[in-house]
Image (spheres, helix red, strand yellow):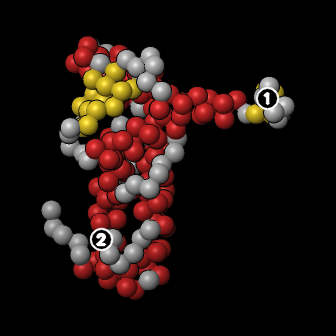
């Protein structure tokens, strides 16, 4: 069988899981600006970050921050083709593993670009959970844009099933499809 490491929390005496401890430490780093060593910018917003967290969160950021790229030398990552609130949500996820109340349709492209498959799956599932007549065409368009992504491919049957099961959703998706 698989062995489990148990750690005793000193204050409460309760058993704690090491991964919970690490998640708590990362979340604390999100709000604590000690030992910051890089900056992420978007529009007029900047976030003080830790390269080690950024590198662990995204292989794209890892390559940029440790290679011979400008980002490595300047210790700055600029994301100029997104909304600052979406970039903040992306960074918050990198640190805490949590996604707050954000627009999954806008966050999914960032998660895909920075190769964060768990976040891609979270966004795609949220889009399906929130599928409605008003957003059906946009959801289909975003899912189409990332056709071939492993996480998206897993959810296509669910999306198609939802559209087939609800005639109004199906019509809303088809009537609002725009040619590229």
Disc 1 element: loop
In percent of width and height, residue 82 lies at 25, 45
Q: Position of residue 32 (x, y in %)?
A: 48, 27
Q: Secondary structure at mark 2?
A: helix
Q: Is residue 32 left or right of residue 112?
A: right
- Above or below, 118 against 27 in this view is below
**Disc 2: which residue:** 137
**For the residue carrying disc 2, how many other residues have a C-alpha within 10 Å: few (<14), some (14-19), or many (20+)?**
many
Spot occupied by residue 58 in the image (x, y as percentages of width and height): 41, 32
Total numbered labels: 2
**Does residue 94 appear in this view?**
yes
Decide: is 111 above or below 174. above
Residue depicted at x 48% and y 59%: 125
Quarter-wise, where is residue 4 in the image? top right
Mark drawn on residue 11: 1
**Residue 76 versus residue 41 in the image, above or below:** above
Residue lying at the far bottom of the rendered structure: 167
Label 1 to label 2: alpha-carbon separation: 52 Å
Residue drawn at x 26%, y 37% is 45
Foreground mark, 1 or 2?
A: 1
Question: Visible in this render: residue 151?
Answer: no
Write the residue at 34% across / 65% down. Answer: 139
Name the image quarter holding residue 52. Answer: top left
Snapshot quadrant of residue 15 = top right
Give the vertical position of 133 relative to 62 (above or below): below
Counting from the top left corner in percent of width and height, residue 176 is at 23, 75
Mark 1 and mark 2 in contact? Answer it, CB < 8 Å: no
Q: Residue at x 37, y 85 (%)?
A: 168
Front one among 114 and 134? 134
Quadrant including the N terminus: top right
56 or 115: nearer the eye? 56
């Amino acid at each position: 069988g698989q062995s489990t490491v148990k750690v005793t929390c000193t204050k409460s005496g309760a058993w704690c899981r090491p991964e919970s401890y690490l998640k708590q430490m990362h979340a604390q780093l999100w709000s604590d600006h000690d030992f910051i060593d890089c900056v992420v910018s978007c529009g007029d917003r900047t976030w003080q970050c830790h390269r080690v967290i950024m590198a662990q969160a995204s292989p794209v950021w890892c390559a940029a921050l440790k290679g011979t790229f400008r980002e490595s030398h300047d210790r700055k990552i600029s994301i100029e083709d997104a909304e600052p609130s979406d970039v903040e949500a992306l960074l918050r996820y990198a640190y805490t593993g949590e996604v707050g109340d954000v627009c999954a349709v806008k966050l999914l492209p960032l998660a895909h670009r920075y190769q964060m498959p768990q976040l891609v799956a979270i966004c795609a599932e949220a889009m399906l959970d929130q599928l409605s007549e008003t957003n059906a065409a946009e959801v289909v368009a975003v899912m189409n844009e990332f056709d071939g992504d492993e996480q998206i491919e897993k959810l296509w049957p669910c999306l198609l099933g939802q559209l087939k099961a609800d005639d109004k959703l199906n019509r809303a998706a088809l009537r609002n499809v725009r040619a590229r």
